[in-house]
Image: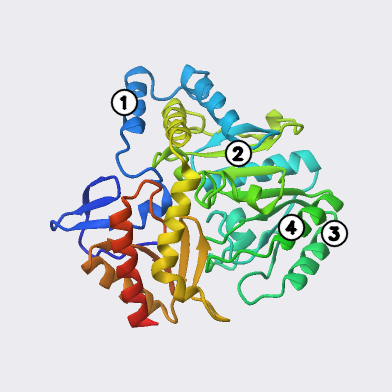
């Protein structure tokens, strides 16, 4: 997802507002790919980072009080029965680390994903679900068709066939496709996926980099889907814009040195401070109520686009994708919305709404009304 600002640049930001080099003020429905989850410049996160800057920036993995405090905070945030394996610098890195955990635990090397999901753009993570356009196809990586208009039974059969090889260490699921038309399967689909992974001895990885941290209502979408994955990756809003992601595992999974979970910048005290402060803010708020209010506002203005056999609007909570007919229409919407004072992300023929949890209700109302107006003119 991207925005097209041409020669414009953002000179400052606060809460749900962006200020451009040409003096414009934009309501932010892009939030830097969903990372500014508590709004830009959140005071508690900024203060925590400033305190940590005065202490120590990075130690190369040597323990710090900041990391210890963060681990305690994350332990209370994760679903029962899970522990934090490691912090990573990005969601892509977290998914790479999840694959290493699965490979060491199962003794297998293969991996399986669903087409249209997004787990990152590295060679491994892109091969699972996303077409980088380079024709690369590492051995042992499988991808099955899934998405809007697809046949769930056929997808499950394809998953079963790939897992029957006995070579797949990890099966990756993005519970709501954030970059592929907001697709989410039926509840029975995800319980069937869990059962297949268990039957074939494959570790189920839930990629909640975008859907986690209450963006879809519950802390993690797997909880709403009634699924207990083996590995949980999460990020985006975890540090409210600071580059950080996490990898959690079932508490009975042993974390071994040969899983190579560390990297130069992972588990650094600045990231830990940002995570600790962000989660503390979430604890002090009522995220479920705020996300519910965002969903109601979006549907009030755009519910018409979710109707019919081929809906243009899909998503839930504070995460929505709008499908246009062509990339040119999507870009025209982005430009028209910018002129109306709204910043939005797009990819191909898709628009994506990712408002911050703390967006001012009146600004969200106005922004969604503008989105509805512009989309209706193009649809």
Viewer-nearest of discs 3 and 2: 2
Front of the two marks 4 and 3 = 3
The residue under label 4 is: 140
Q: Earlier in the sequence, mark 1 or mark 2?
A: 1
Location of residue 51 by image quarter = top left
Frontmost residue, 370 versus 7: 370
Q: Separation of disc 1 and disc 2 at Cα? A: 26 Å
Nearer-N-terminus badge (2/4): 4
Label 1 sits on residue: 50
Which colour assignment does the render follow?
A: rainbow
Which label lies toward us, 1 or 3?
1
Q: What residue occupies the far left of the structure in this picture? A: 23
Residue highlighted by disc 2: 247
Element under disc 4:
loop
Element type where label 3 sits in the image: loop
Q: Earlier in the sequence, mark 1 or mark 3?
A: 1
Q: In percent of the image, x 46 and y 58: which residue is there?
A: 295
Q: Nearer the viewer, mark 1 or mark 4?
A: 1
Q: Is residue 15 left or right of residue 247?
A: left
Compared across the picture, whether 1 is left or right of 189 comes to left
């Amino acid at each position: 997802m991207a925005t097209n600002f041409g020669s414009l640049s953002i000179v400052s930001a606060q809460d749900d507002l962006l200020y451009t080099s040409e003096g414009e003020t934009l309501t932010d429905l892009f939030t830097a790919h969903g990372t500014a989850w508590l709004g830009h410049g959140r005071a508690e996160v900024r203060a925590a980072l400033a305190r940590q800057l005065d202490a120590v920036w990075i130690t190369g993995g040597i323990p710090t009080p900041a990391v210890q405090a963060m681990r305690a905070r994350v332990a209370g945030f994760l679903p029962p029965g899970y522990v934090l394996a490691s912090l990573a610098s990005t969601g892509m890195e977290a998914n790479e680390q999840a694959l290493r955990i699965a490979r060491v635990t199962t003794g297998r090397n293969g991996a399986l994903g669903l087409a249209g999901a997004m787990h990152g753009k590295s060679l491994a993570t892109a091969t699972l679900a996303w077409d980088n356009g380079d024709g690369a196809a590492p051995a042992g990586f499988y991808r099955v068709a899934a998405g809007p208009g697809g046949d769930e039974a056929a997808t499950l059969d394809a998953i079963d066939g790939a897992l029957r090889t006995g070579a797949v260490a990890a099966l990756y699921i993005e519970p709501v496709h954030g970059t592929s038309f907001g697709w989410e399967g039926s509840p029975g689909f995800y319980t069937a996926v869990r059962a297949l992974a268990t039957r074939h001895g494959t570790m189920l990885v839930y990629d909640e980099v975008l859907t986690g941290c209450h963006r879809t209502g519950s802390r993690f979408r797997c909880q709403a889907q009634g699924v207990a994955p083996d590995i949980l990756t999460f990020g985006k809003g975890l540090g409210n814009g600071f580059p950080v992601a996490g990898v959690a595992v079932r508490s009975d999974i042993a974390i071994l040195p040969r899983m190579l979970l560390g990297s130069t910048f992972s588990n650094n005290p600045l990231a830990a401070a940002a995570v600790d402060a962000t989660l503390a803010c979430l604890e002090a708020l009522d995220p479920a109520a705020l996300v519910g209010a965002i969903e109601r506002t979006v549907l009030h203005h755009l519910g018409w686009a979710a109707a019919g056999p081929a809906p243009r609007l899909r998503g839930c909570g504070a995460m929505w994708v709008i499908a246009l007919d062509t990339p040119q229409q999507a870009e025209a919407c982005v430009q028209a919305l910018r002129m109306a004072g709204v910043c939005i992300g797009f990819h191909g023929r898709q628009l994506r709404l990712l408002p911050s949890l703390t967006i001012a209700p009146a600004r969200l109302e106005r922004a969604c009304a503008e989105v509805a107006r512009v989309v209706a003119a193009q649809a």
